[in-house]
Amino acid sequence: MSKIKIASLSDLPPGKMKEYRIAGKVIALANCEGEIKAFDGFCTHEKCSLAGGFLDGFTLTCYCHGASFDISTGEVLAPPATSPLKTYPVTLVGQDIMIELD
Ligand code: FES
């Protein structure tokens, strides 16, 4: 497993999500009241971009058909998605947001 810098804290104010392309993957980051979460950038239902969805605490709702996920665990909270979302460990090194890719 390798840690990669994906962004800086200043790029991601509280309540915001952004999508990044890194190491051949599309990863989304969310700032949930100061806690940074990282997860696959595409919904497990029909692959809509999750960074364009709606964030309420740690609950992310996909804008396409309304599936929702707990972005701390990847658990599906509401259909039509049935498969969990892949999440990635995040560490902060100063202002650098680092994620672990497998
Ligand atoms: S693509 Fe996200 S709910 Fe359908």
Image (tube, rainbow, N blue to C red):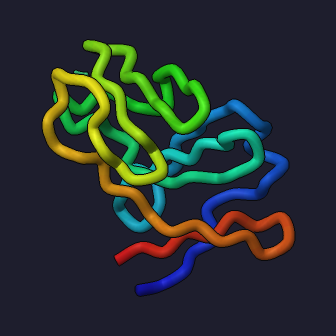
Q: Position of residue 39 (x, y in %)?
A: 43, 51
Q: Give above or below for 61 relative to 99.
A: above
Question: Relative to residue 52, is residue 62 drawn left or right?
Answer: left
Question: Relative to residue 63, is residue 94 drawn left or right?
Answer: right
- Ligand 1: image quarter: top left
Q: Position of residue 15 (x, y in %)?
A: 70, 31
* Extreme residue in the front direction: 77
User: What residue appears at the point 47 percent right and 61 percent down from the top-left corner?
Assistant: 22
Q: Nearer the viewer, residue 56 or 14?
A: 56
* Extreme residue in the bottom direction: 1
Q: Nearer the viewer, residue 61 or 21?
A: 61
Question: Relative to residue 86, is residue 36 drawn left or right?
Answer: right
User: What residue appears at the point 27 percent right and 37 percent down from the top-left corner?
Assistant: 76
User: What residue appears at the point 21 percent right and 38 percent down from the top-left corner?
Assistant: 44
**Quarter of the image that includes the C terminus:** bottom left
User: What residue appears at the point 69 percent right and 64 percent down from the top-left corner?
Assistant: 97
Give residue 92's quadrant in the image. Answer: bottom right
Question: Relative to residue 2, is residue 77 drawn left or right?
Answer: left
Q: Give above or below for 100 relative to 71.
A: below
Q: Position of residue 45 (x, y in %)?
A: 18, 30
Q: Nearer the viewer, residue 70 or 91?
A: 70
Q: Position of residue 13 (x, y in %)?
A: 79, 38
